[in-house]
Amino acid sequence: MSVTKDEKQKLVKKFAKKAGDTGCPEVQAAILTAEIENLKAHLSTHKKDNHSRRGIMLKVAKRRKILAYLKRKNQSSYEDVIKKLEIRK
């Protein structure tokens, strides 16, 4: 259900500005998106799991804040991340 270490490393390589850059907003948003997708799959089979539903809502809110920060600081990077993650139109 959670994102594995290998998946996180692939996301870091894909979205990082430089090698090992795990703290940039692009990487954080990508990891949160992967976690949200895993939780969505879990919630599709376990519809009454309210604890996981709360978890997904917290992750969505955190991703929204990170993306808002990225949009405010670097518009072009924000647009690239949105296209790569396919989360908005």
Image: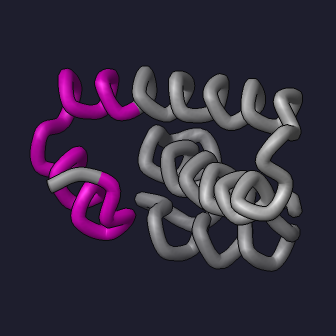
Residue 7 is situated, as x and y percent measured from the top left of the image, at 73, 75
Q: Does residue 73 lie above or below 88 as drawn?
A: above
**Which residue shows up at 49% across the image and 34% down it?**
63
Q: Does residue 11 lie above or below 24 as drawn?
A: below
Residue located farthest toward the front when viewing the structure as drawn: 48
**Which residue shows up at 86% across the image and 69% down it?**
4
Q: Does residue 19 lie above or below 68 as drawn?
A: below
The answer to if 75 sits in the magenta stretch is: yes
Q: How is the image coloured?
A: one colour
Please state if 70 lies on the left or on the right of 43 as rendered.
left
**Which residue shows up at 30% across the image and 32% down it?**
70
Principal SS element in the magenta part?
helix
Residue 51 is situated, as x and y percent measured from the top left of the image, at 87, 29
**Which residue shows up at 55% across the image and 25% down it?**
62
In depth, the one of 48 and 13 nearer the eye is 48
Residue 13 is situated, as x and y percent measured from the top left of the image, at 57, 74
Among the 4 quarters of the image, the one containing residue 34: bottom right
Residue 72 is situated, as x and y percent measured from the top left of the image, at 19, 22
Q: Which residues are magenta?
A: 67-87
Image quadrant in which the N terminus is located: bottom right
Among the 4 quarters of the image, the one containing residue 78: top left
Image quadrant in which the C terminus is located: bottom left
Please state if 87 lies on the left or on the right of 21 as rendered.
left
